[in-house]
Amino acid sequence: MPDTAFDFESSLKNMSKKEWISEVTDLVDEHGYLTPLGRRHIATFVEDGKTLLVSFETHQGIQTLSPQVHPLGWEMVKTHRWSHLGLISDGDTWFRDPAVYAFFDRLVDDGFFDEFEDVLFYGAGPCGYAAAAFSVAAPGAKVLAIQPQATLDPRVTEWDKRFTDMRRTNFTDRYGYAPDMLDAAAETFVIYDPAETEDAMHAALFTRAGVTKLRLPHMGASLQTDLLQLDILYPLLAAASENRLTPRLFARLARARRDHLPYLRRLLARLEQDDRPALVAALCHNVTQRMRAPRFASRLKRANDRMAD
């Protein structure tokens, strides 16, 4: 393992993509590598501990989600002394690229994953698909996938109208149908909101032995962002790697959403849509007792007035 500490303080904000790649290359130089994989993908590796996080992210997502514009996995290197292999795409590609396949083939041939005691694959949305699909390269790995697609092959998921531009992309060759690629995984966790119809339908395709589905009702379509804001994404990664992630622990961590206004607003909107004034009043009373929330105070008065009529 490297003798020198990795620099987590450098901000990579306000850089062009070319500048960002150059700076990351310099930062990881003594601890690993950065390598291009075709036109739209790169891989970065930071070596530290015997636990390896393999994360899939987009360059655009890193710009949005990280205050310092660092790959998500660097936080686990910093706080848990994990090693990190990051696959980064330019836009949503689902990592369907022969250059990415060849990269994982080389890792397998080199026995790369055998060097680690624990391996965890992670991603959200299109990156969640990739985390599940490429986990087959490391038998015995664990997988944490947020809102993953199973495939975008229109013969299987023609009901998903969100990504019609990807329908000509081949999802049937190597590392193709994500649920099938999980057969060698030690354990897989799929997090989704059952109220998001397409996400729930994809989650259903992952129903198989070794897969635990964890539901977050009324959290919406941007779960990764919400979990970061709630400060529970990194604890979930740690728990998954350490064999501690259970539905009960997940439920306990997810209680943080009781103080998360975006979630509370979505829940309020659903109760109003369902015309449940008594539940609206109960929710709004609970929220206004715990925080300053003018919208909920207004809705509480309205719900009480309705029930008094």
Image (spheres, rainbow, N blue to C red):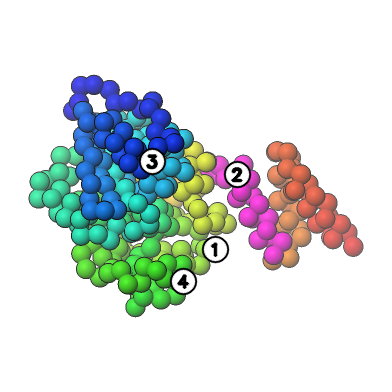
Q: Which residue is mark 3?
A: 16
In the displayed structure, 82 sits above or below 202; it is: above
Q: Which residue is mark 2?
A: 260
As measured in the structure, the alpha-carbon distance from the residue carrying label 3 to the one carrying label 2 is 33 Å
Q: Amino acid at mark 2?
A: His
Q: Amino acid at mark 1?
A: Ala
In the displayed structure, 42 sits above or below 132; it is: above
Mark in front: 1 vs 3: 3
Q: Which mark is residue 6?
A: none
Q: Amino acid at mark 3?
A: Ser
Q: Quadrant of residue 15?
A: top left
Which numbered disc, 1 or 3, marks the residue that appears first in the sequence?
3
Which numbered disc, 2 or 4, marks the residue that appears first in the sequence?
4
- Dots 1, 2 in contact, CB < 8 A: no
In the picture provided, is 71 more to the left or to the right than 228? Answer: left
Residue 92 in percent (x, y) is at 38, 57
Q: Which residue is mark 4?
A: 161
